[in-house]
Image: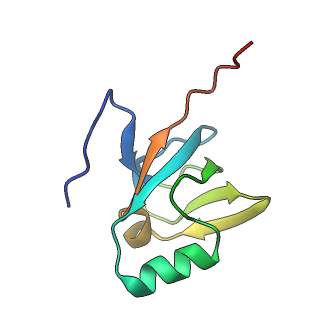
Amino acid sequence: MITPIVDGKVLTLADTVPGKKYRILRINGGRRLNSRLFAMGLVPNETFYVSNESRGGPVRISIKGSIFAIGKGMANKIVVREMNNRKKY
């Protein structure tokens, strides 16, 4: 699978950094994976925070007030973009 890199900010969920905010761009999965992730609220354009760093285990994310652990196989199929965390005045 090829993940486009634009300004170094587009990556897969498996490559995210804890404490940062991300937006889901797309899910490169089949019907079953998409259905499962959509049921958990992981849909394109939704934002979330990464809760922990896990080099080899699941990635823990916080989305819509819930916390989920996403396995590395699934995480590699979720393409995200890092959000600009600066406040606009």
Left or right of 58, for residue 66 = right
Q: Position of residue 61 (x, y in %)?
A: 63, 57
Location of residue 21 (image quadrant): top right
Location of residue 56 (image quadrant): bottom left
Left or right of 50, for residue 12 = left
Q: Position of residue 86 (x, y in %)?
A: 64, 20
- Quadrant including the N terminus: bottom left
Q: Position of residue 85 (x, y in %)?
A: 63, 27
The image shows residue 89, relative to residue 43, as above or below, that is: above
Viewer-proximal residue among 53 and 65: 65
Q: Residue visible at 43% across and 87% down? A: 32
Q: Residue furthest top?
A: 89
- Quadrant including the C terminus: top right
Q: Residue visible at 51% across and 82% down? A: 35
Q: Residue furthest bottom?
A: 32
Q: Residue furthest right?
A: 65
Left or right of 31, for residue 87 = right
Location of residue 22 (image quadrant): top right
The image shows residue 5, relative to residue 54, as above or below, that is: above
Q: Position of residue 63 (x, y in %)?
A: 69, 57
The image shows residue 53, relative to residue 88, as above or below, that is: below
- Number of callouts in the render? 0
Q: Residue visible at 60% across and 54% down? A: 46
Left or right of 78, for residue 6 = left
Q: Residue visible at 65% across and 67% down? A: 68
